[in-house]
Image (tube, rainbow, N blue to C red):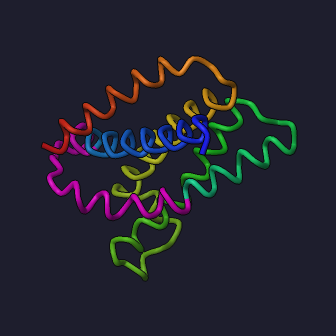
Amino acid sequence: MKRSDLFYIWAAVTGYLTGIIVYIASLWALYGETFNEINKLITWTAPAFFTVGLLLYSIAVAVLRSLNRYSFWLQTLLFVILGFIPVMLVPIMMGFLAFTTIWFVFSPEGMLFMLAYTSIALVCSYGFWVAHKRLSKKPFTIFSIVILALFIYATI
């Protein structure tokens, strides 16, 4: 495995942690509620992101490159749109097999997950762009350290 491959993985993990932080912060900012069940949140979101989400992101990057339309903004837009799919998988992970309609995305709980997956899309897109264009990794690394510190703070 090359170093650049590891950076893609680090970008995905940083994006996921950002999504968790955004979910918790949005819950507090919009509804004034605190969230103490971080393990359940990770159980609901991690499988959807690390299987379906990353697979869709990889396919999106491959398609954009094959069409010679690979740009940061188009990749980001596509990642945000593809974020609807993992959001619709969250009720399945929660155990609500009959509640898997598209309308979950527009419910108050679904909007929190959509905010989380949108932030994941933004961070992953930036990280993938840095890795692909071989830009300086220092700003993204500093951002990752801040996100990791916030995640640790949010879980204590």
Image spot of residue 6 (x, y percent): 53, 40
| Depth check, front residue: 100 or 53 | 53
- Left of 104 or right of it: where is 72? right
User: Which residue is depicted at the point 63% across and 50% down?
Assistant: 57
Instruction: Indicate whether 94 appears above or below 132.
Output: below
Considering every residue shown, the one lying at the far front of the view is 1
Question: Which quarter of the figure is the C terminus placed in?
Answer: top left
- What main secondary structure does the magenta stretch of the protein show? helix
| Depth check, front residue: 121 or 140 | 140
Question: Which quarter of the figure is the N terminus placed in?
Answer: top right
Instruction: Indicate whether 132 appears above or below 89.
Output: above
Considering every residue shown, the one lying at the far right of the view is 67
Image quadrant in which you'd find residue 39 = bottom left
Figure disc tally: 0
User: Which residue is depicted at the point 42% across and 46% down?
Assistant: 16
Image spot of residue 129 (x, y percent): 64, 30
Give the residues in magenta: 27-52
User: Which residue is depicted at the point 34% across and 78% down?
Assistant: 95
Considering every residue shown, the one lying at the far bottom of the view is 98
Image spot of residue 116 (x, y percent): 41, 46
- Left of 63 or right of it: where is 60? left
- Left of 135 or right of it: where is 110? left
Image spot of residue 59 (x, y percent): 70, 54
User: Which residue is depicted at the point 48% across and 18% down?
Assistant: 138
| Depth check, front residue: 89 or 98 | 89
